[in-house]
Image (cartoon, rainbow, N blue to C red):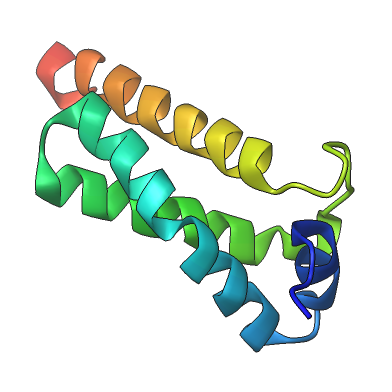
Amino acid sequence: MTRTDAELLTAARDDPAAFRELYDRYVQRVHGFHLRRTRDHDAAHDLTAETFAQAWIARARFRDLAGGSADQRWQGNSRRLYWRRIHARARPSRRENI
């Protein structure tokens, strides 16, 4: 029987295999999101890895606010990471201001 995203996210708190199942379920979608926005395979790969790394770190705080689907969670995390990277590149470094 296939477990729901909410069941997997809850199980992933203590079970890395459950998180891996979510990763396998969503990695192509998350990577595609980043690739469409960056048009850079390396950047998309890095952002995808960071999306899932942050989800792994925050897995204990999961609350099911999307009716059992993790899709909105990945989309939200992906958008935040993408915009952080864009803003970081646009900001001059402190060394440039000296």
92, 88: nearer the viewer: 88
Q: How far across and how far down the image is residue 18, in percent?
A: 69, 79
Q: Is residue 33 left or right of residue 79?
A: left
Q: How far across and how far down the image is residue 65, in percent?
A: 88, 37
From what the image shows, is residue 98 above or below residue 62? Answer: above
Task: Tell me the residue at 41%/46% (across/down).
Answer: 29
Task: Tell me the residue at 69%/48% (across/down).
Answer: 70
The mark total stands at 0
From what the image shows, is residue 15 above or below residue 26? Answer: below
Q: How far across and how far down the image is residue 14, in percent?
A: 80, 84
From what the image shows, is residue 32 above or below residue 38? Answer: below
95, 9: nearer the viewer: 9
Q: Quadrant of residue 3?
A: bottom right
Q: How far across and how far down the image is residue 4, in percent?
A: 79, 62
Q: Is residue 90 left or right of residue 12?
A: left
Task: Tell me the residue at 12%/31% (across/down).
Answer: 39
Inspect this view and state whether residue 98 appears: no
Q: Quadrant of residue 27?
A: bottom left
Q: Is residue 51 left or right of residue 58?
A: left
Q: Is residue 79 left or right of residue 97?
A: right
Inspect this view and state whether residue 48 appears: yes
- Locate the N terminus by quadrant: bottom right
- Locate the C terminus by quadrant: top left
Q: Residue furthest front?
A: 1
Task: Tell me the residue at 74%/59% (across/down).
Answer: 5
